[in-house]
Amino acid sequence: MIGTRAEDLPSVGQCPEMDALRGYVTGGDATRYSNQAASTLRMDVTHSNLIQRYHDLVFDVNMTISRVKEKLYTHGGTPVADQELYLRRGGGDTMFLYDDSKTLGFYGARNGMEIHIKDTNPHSLSAHGGLEDVSQVEKYVMADEDYDKLENSVRAMKRREKEKEAAKAAAEKAARLAAGEVIEEEPIEPEVTVEEVIAKIPLGSRCEVRPGGRRGEVAYVGEVRGTKGVWVGVRLDEPQGNNDGSMKGKQYFDCKGDKYGCFSKPENIEVGDFPELDPFASSDDEF
């Protein structure tokens, strides 16, 4: 096997650099609570429906459990009536804070311990990723035609800049012609049609995309919103692309996921016998 194996690497105890790093990170642990008031507690808080963890929230040892629930409502969003609190004291020792009239001190709360919030409401807003999973939020997508009508958009600004550049170039050209200068016109390359590209790059054919030798299957040939000319959409074998087969809110072809799609000009596509590469394949000529 080529390369370093995990078992060949030194353990944390055998690596002086890791020991030094651990010493730096934990150097202030013994005195981290020294400069706070005697009744102050700093504890972590976790929530049954949330991934995030609240670190070092400040409480007072004389706070009642009812008051603690009111404070935690502002962090986790769970109403007081739907909270069950548990004090995790370390080493698997967990205590249910069942009496709202008792204080944190009554239950033996100390610095560095953890309060766990259990949300008892099955229809809670935080359940099933309701407060953290952004994929559940419906995204607003403006139609391309409506975006074109805006005067204060980036596209409108670029359009005005292009118009200014074109007007400036036309004025310079007119001045040169008026001065008697002979200007050779640059030849205009004929635009290829979708049918011409499909004849050379058929849909469903295996291909390789330059640069990078990325392999995949031709999934789309045609125009792409916001661009000029004919483009080839490729469904890549590996996540080496720039999109998921969509562009500016429009889906042109399906992919395995993000980065598995790309659009490229026809001249960068080579059609042929390009099977999917096996990353675990070996050769007798390699060692």
Image: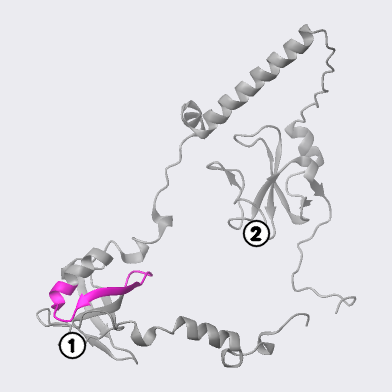
**Residue 263 at x, y percent in the picture:** 68, 45
The foreground one among 12 and 273 is 12
Label 2 sits on residue: 239
The foreground one among 110 and 188 is 110
Q: Which quarter of the figure has residue 159?
A: top right
For image coordinates 82% across by 7% down, the residue present is 180
The foreground one among 281 and 111 is 111
Does the magenta segment cover residue 234?
no
Up-down relation of residue 250 to residue 16 (above or below): above
Up-down relation of residue 215 to residue 121 (above or below): above
Q: Is residue 77 visible?
A: no
Q: Residues within 10 Å of mark 2 (few under 14, many from 20)?
A: some
- Could you say whether the residue bearing mark 1 is in a helix, strand or loop? loop
Q: CA distance from mark 2 to mark 1?
A: 52 Å
Q: Give the numbered dot on residue 107.
A: 1
Considering every residue shown, the one lying at the far front of the view is 35
Considering every residue shown, the one lying at the far right of the view is 285
| Mark 2 vs 1, N-terminal side | 1
**Residue 61 at x, y percent in the picture:** 17, 81
Q: Is residue 267 left or right of residue 51?
A: right
Q: Is residue 6 left or right of residue 138?
A: right
Residue type highlighted by circle 2:
Pro
**What's the magenta region?**
47-68
Q: Residues within 10 Å of mark 1 (few under 14, many from 20)?
A: some
